[in-house]
Every structure is written in C-alpha cells, then in structure tokens.
C-alpha cells in the first residue's frame, strides 16, 4: 500500500518579538502527486509556525485510510505529539508542573488531526541538511515570510 509523505517546517523572523513574522511550509506527496502549501502570520513564534505547518498539512488530507509519514525538523513538535500530549491529556491538558502547555490550542488541534488517522508516523529529521523535502519546506516558509515582509 502506498503512503502519503509530508515534509513540514516553520520559521519566524524576530522570533518572540512583537514585530515577528512567522512562516510555515509543507509538501504533501502521494504517488506522482505533489502539493506545496505555505502561509505566514505576523507576531508568530517559530514553535507556533512549526505546529501550524503540520496542522495545515493534515487538514489537506481527506482520508483516514492511507498511511501517513510526516517528516519534521522540530524536536518540539515531534516529541510533543509523540510523547508529551498523552501525558498532558491525562492531566486535563496540564504539564507535570500543573501549568498549561504553551500553544495549547495548536496542540489540541494537532492532536485531533493525528487521532483521526489510522496509520500515522511523525519522524524527526535533521534540519537544514541533505533532506530535499525538509529543505523545500523551509524554502516555502521563507517564501511565505517574504510575501509579508515587504
């Protein structure tokens, strides 16, 4: 059985500052079909854009029956969705210290989308390396920021 491959990335210029510009990019590949998507937000952090890239990718998927493999260079997102979310949910969306995780609404949406899929793997890849898909997702995030940064 074939699978859907997704490469997603996020970035932020002036990360954490009021004047930041965040961008996300993603490539979805299924057989010979390839779709590139991207977007930007003013005032967004890098982590928000990493999450948004994965969310927007999964929102494009209209089936739950095809295996999905997502490649992402963000340890924050990969560890979060593969490990931390399970514990947060057990504690009513609280971390071990009783605090609410940052970007909680994005985490909840990502968890909802991942939970809909029957077979999904989210894999950490090295960023800015020899991974063409990840490099292109990064380019798309930068294109998105360039379109806002005029």
Image (cartoon, grey):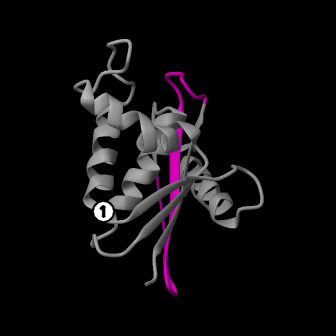
Identify the image quadrant of the C terminus: top right
Identify the image quadrant of the N terminus: bottom left
Count of number-bearing discs: 1
Q: Is residue 41 visible?
A: no
Q: Nearer the viewer, residue 14 or 8?
A: 8
Q: Main secondary structure of the magenta part?
A: strand
Q: What percent of the width, then of the height, locates residue 43? A: 46, 30
Label 1 sits on a secondary structure element that is: loop
Q: What percent of the width, then of the height, locates residue 98? A: 32, 13
Q: Nearer the viewer, residue 86 or 148?
A: 86
Q: Indicate whether 76 appears above or below 58.
A: above
Q: Is residue 54 visible?
A: yes
Going 37% across and 30% down the picture, which residue do you hit?
103
Q: Indicate whether 89 appears above or below 150.
A: above
Q: Indicate whether 87 appears above or below 131.
A: above
Q: Is residue 27 magenta?
A: yes
Which quarter of the figure has residue 17? Answer: top right
Q: Nearer the viewer, residue 38 or 59?
A: 59
Q: Is residue 37 magenta?
A: yes
Going 50% across and 85% down the picture, which residue do you hit?
31
Judged left or right of residue 101, residue 92 is left
Q: Indicate whether 105 appears above or below 100.
A: below
- Label 1 Cα crowd, 10 Å radius (few <14 / some 14-19 / many 20+): some
Residue at the outermost bottom position? 32
- The magenta segment: 14-39
Q: Which residue is mark 1?
A: 117
Q: Nearer the viewer, residue 39 or 10?
A: 10
Residue at the outermost right position? 130
Going 76% across and 54% down the picture, which residue do you hit?
129
Judged left or right of residue 64, residue 150 is right
Which quarter of the figure has residue 113? Answer: bottom left
């Amino acid at each position: 059985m074939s699978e859907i491959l997704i490469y997603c990335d996020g970035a932020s210029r002036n990360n954490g500052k009021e004047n930041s510009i965040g961008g996300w990019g993603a490539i979805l590949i299924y057989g010979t079909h390839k779709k590139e998507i991207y977007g930007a937000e003013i005032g967004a952090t890098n982590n928000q854009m990493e999450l948004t890239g994965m969310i927007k990718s999964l929102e494009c998927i209209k089936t739950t029956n095809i295996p999905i493999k997502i490649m992402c260079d963000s340890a924050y997102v990969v560890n979060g969705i593969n490990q931390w979310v399970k514990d947060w949910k057990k504690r009513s969306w609280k971390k071990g210290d009783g605090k609410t995780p940052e970007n909680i609404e994005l985490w909840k949406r990502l968890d909802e989308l991942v939970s809909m899929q029957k077979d999904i793997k989210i894999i950490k890849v090295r960023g800015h390396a020899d991974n063409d898909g990840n490099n292109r997702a990064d380019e798309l995030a930068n294109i998105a920021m360039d379109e806002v940064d005029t």
